[in-house]
Image (tube, rainbow, N blue to C red):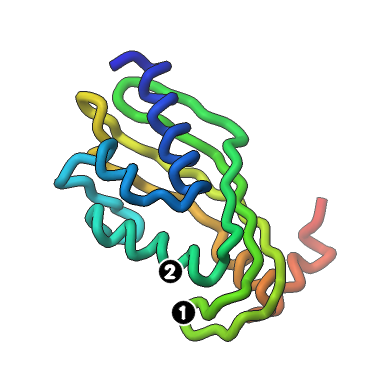
Amino acid sequence: MSLEENKAKVCKVIEAINEQNLDFLDSLTAPDYFDHTHQLNPEGVKQFMNMIFKAFPDWHETIEDIIAEGDKVWVRARATGTHTGEYRGLAPTGKKITGMGVNIYRIVNGKFVEGWAVEDWMDFLKQLGVIEYKGFPDEVKL
């Protein structure tokens, strides 16, 4: 597969997530796909995303940057959603959140075989009001 074809596959995954069409992922994911960050197989990924959709029914991801090299695609995406359902025991807050994440996918023969993610959970929890984070003290600011 070309680098452009691999990037297009990642765009299709983001589109499927935005449409909450998780069954579409089956056509793009190898049966032995593994998400290293969350320690999930393909079915686990679907369960995780369904949990997100129940808590944030308007969940939407927007690609900010996408880079392909070899068999990997890196994507920096912004996610938004309104917390109107329970999330991991946290009652709905009604708050609109915005988060940034970087996902790395390895694609072999047109199928996603591995994934990794870097996510800012501290900011996510701060936006939901679960934690209070005041930032760095003035003496360490530039």
Q: How many marks?
A: 2
Residue 9 to residue 97: above or below = above
Q: Nearer the viewer, residue 76 or 86?
A: 86
Pinpoint residue 43: horizontal percent, then vertical percent: 24, 58
Q: Which mark is residue 96?
A: none
Mark 1 is on which residue type? Answer: Arg
- Quadrant where the N terminus lies? top left
Residue lying at the far top in this picture: please name it.
2
Give the residue drawn at x 53%, y 71%. 55
Does residue 105 appear to the left or right of 99 in the view shown?
left
Q: Image quadrant of residue 103?
A: top left
Residue at mark 2 to residue at mark 1: CA–CA distance:
8 Å
Mark 2 is on which residue type? Answer: Met
Residue 130 to residue 141: above or below = below
Q: Nearer the viewer, residue 39 or 63?
A: 63
Pinpoint residue 121: horizontal percent, then vertical percent: 55, 64
Q: Nearer the viewer, residue 119 or 95?
A: 95
Q: Circle 1 sits on which residue?
A: 88
Q: Nearer the viewer, residue 75 or 55?
A: 55
Give the residue drawn at x 51%, y 77%. 87
Secondary structure beneath dot 1 equals loop
Whether the residues at callouts 2 and 1 have beta carbons within 8 Å, the answer is yes
Q: Image quadrant of residue 115?
A: top left
Give the residue drawn at x 32%, y 21%. 70
Does residue 120 appear to the left or right of 129 in the view shown?
left
Q: Which mark is residue 51?
A: 2
